[in-house]
Image (cartoon, helix red, strand yellow):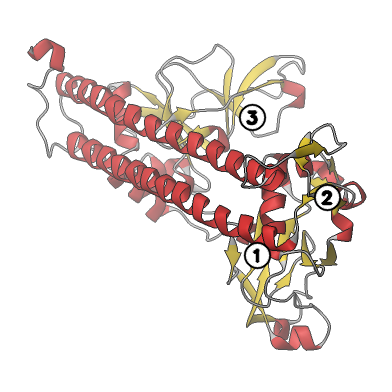
């Protein structure tokens, strides 16, 4: 590659004026298959020290750190003040068509080479000098242009189909939340008489329901982290749940596990099956409020709370209520140290929950299991469709840039017609 591109040609000097405005792109601002998706406008004096690489139109960005993220993109039209992180190699085409190069670096064979040459486990990285030594196919310029035009056209079609599926998933997510919210605030009977709840955000509720503060419906239990220096406490058979594990409705396993000795020594405490696990501290709370149920006895870390329903409170219904009222929980979020989001426990414990009689709680919980299962199945189907389209996209790019398919005579459908 180094014979047809230059690498990291231009950088901002330390003498740049502190009030000089830049458009900064970080590794997280580049999405595989979509290009640059997020740019932050900053003053140079406020920008991270890694905001140094100058990017021009036609340059190609390839992440050299955390290479498993596949953060790479062709920058077709760069803003005059576009600056990339030093975590990127900025490739400037010299004797290669920029759009062809953009497709080459996104091909499976090139991405695989980058990942295989990266060093480090938790933070794999590759030197820019090693990156540009990777061998790439180089057809004549006219054929590069033909391949790029073909791939631009065909990947755009696939990307449009992917975007349709993403919109469908977003609509299904909205529908799911609406179904849950309605059921836990109005019940299942549309003909039930209503009464004012006395709470502005809640409005009317079924006349036979109550409104009860959360703190009277459940007991709260905090978690903690056993000493990492005591190896006898770790790599056991007891799940130790943290924020990263709150991805399924029912938790039966965790990324990290602790030992029975940690529990016996009081370094951690178990919460019983059926406990409701919620996140009370972490950046996830900036956009969502995970609610899960413990499917096995488990320990939790200090960023979580476990809720044990009191008599008369069905645990399944309480979990659905917290999901349906997620917006109200998120409205009680403050910032802890270093900008981390944290739930204000006094305000959250006082949050009022619409409460039907216990038999009706169980009926609502069962109905929501059935309704959301259907919506989740549709979401899973759309997710699979996206994966298949992305596989087809990747295979097409790899085949075209390595000459497995001849695209020189292909034409757009409208031209062929």
Q: In which quarter of the image is the C terminus?
A: top left
Q: Can residue 134 be seen in this view?
A: no
| Circle 1 or circle 2, nearest the eye | 2
- Tell me what residue is drawn at x 72 percent, y 76 percent: 272
For numbered disc 3, what is the local secondary structure?
Answer: strand
For numbered disc 2, what is the local secondary structure?
Answer: strand
User: Image quarter for residue 131?
Assistant: top left
Q: Name the residue under label 1.
A: 293
- Tell me what residue is drawn at x 32 percent, y 31 percent: 161
* Mark sitting on residue 210: 2
Q: Is residue 5 visible?
A: yes
Q: Residues within 10 Å of mark 1 (few under 14, many from 20)?
A: many
For numbered disc 1, what is the local secondary structure?
Answer: strand
Q: Where is residue 396 in the image (x, y as percent from the top left)?
A: 22, 37
Q: In this view, does 13 lie above or below 361?
A: above
* Mark sitting on residue 51: 3
Tell me the CA gap for discs 3 and 2: 55 Å
Q: Is residue 208 above or below residue 315?
A: above
Q: Where is residue 307 in the image (x, y as percent from the top left)?
A: 78, 64
Q: Where is residue 256 in the image (x, y as percent from the top left)?
A: 63, 71
Horizontal side of 280 relative to 72 (left or right) equals right
Q: In this view, does 399 lie above or below 279?
A: above
Q: Judge by depth and name the residue closer to the eye, 415 or 131.
A: 415
Tell me the CA gap for discs 1 and 2: 24 Å
Q: Judge by depth and name the residue closer to the eye, 10 or 346.
A: 346
User: Image quarter for residue 219?
Assistant: bottom right
Total marks placed: 3
| Precedes in sequence: disc 3 or disc 2 | 3
| Precedes in sequence: disc 1 or disc 3 | 3
| Circle 3 or circle 2, nearest the eye | 2
């Amino acid at each position: 590659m180094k014979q047809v591109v230059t690498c990291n040609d231009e950088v901002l000097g330390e003498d740049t004026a502190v009030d000089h405005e830049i458009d900064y792109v970080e590794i997280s601002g580049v999405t595989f298959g979509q290009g640059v998706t997020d740019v932050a406008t900053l003053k140079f004096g406020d920008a991270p020290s890694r905001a140094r690489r100058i990017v021009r139109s036609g340059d190609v960005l390839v992440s050299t750190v955390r290479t498993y993220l596949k953060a790479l993109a062709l920058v077709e039209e760069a803003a005059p003040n576009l600056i990339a992180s030093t975590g990127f190699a900025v490739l400037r085409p010299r004797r290669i068509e920029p759009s062809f190069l953009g497709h080459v670096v996104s091909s499976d064979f090139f991405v695989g080479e980058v990942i295989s040459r990266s060093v480090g486990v938790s933070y794999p990285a590759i030197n820019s000098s090693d990156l540009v030594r990777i061998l790439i196919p180089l057809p004549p310029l006219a054929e590069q242009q033909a391949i790029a035009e073909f791939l631009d056209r065909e990947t755009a079609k696939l990307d449009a189909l992917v975007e349709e599926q993403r919109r469908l998933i977003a609509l299904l997510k909205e529908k799911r939340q609406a179904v849950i919210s309605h059921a836990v605030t109005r019940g299942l009977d549309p003909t039930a008489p209503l009464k004012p709840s006395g709470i502005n955000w809640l409005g009317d509720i079924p006349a036979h329901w109550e409104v009860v503060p959360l703190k009277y419906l459940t007991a709260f239990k905090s978690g903690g982290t056993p000493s990492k220096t005591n190896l006898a406490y770790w790599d056991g058979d007891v799940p130790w749940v943290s924020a990263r594990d709150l991805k399924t409705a029912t938790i039966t396993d965790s990324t990290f596990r602790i030992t029975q000795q940690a529990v016996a020594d009081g370094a951690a405490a178990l919460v019983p099956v059926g406990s409701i696990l919620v996140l009370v501290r972490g950046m996830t709370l900036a956009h969502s409020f995970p609610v899960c149920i413990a499917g096995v006895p488990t320990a939790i870390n200090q960023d979580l709370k476990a809720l044990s329903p009191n008599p008369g409170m069905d645990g399944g219904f309480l979990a659905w209520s917290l999901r349906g009222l997620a917006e109200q929980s998120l409205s009680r979020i403050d910032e802890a140290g270093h900008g981390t989001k944290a739930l204000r426990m006094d305000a959250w414990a006082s949050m009022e929950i619409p409460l039907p009689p216990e038999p009706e709680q169980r009926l609502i919980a069962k109905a929501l299991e059935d309704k959301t299962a259907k919506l989740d199945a549709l979401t899973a189907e759309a997710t699979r469709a996206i994966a298949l389209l992305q596989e087809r996209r990747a295979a097409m790019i790899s085949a075209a840039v390595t000459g497995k398919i001849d695209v020189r005579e292909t034409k757009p459908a409208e031209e062929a017609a």
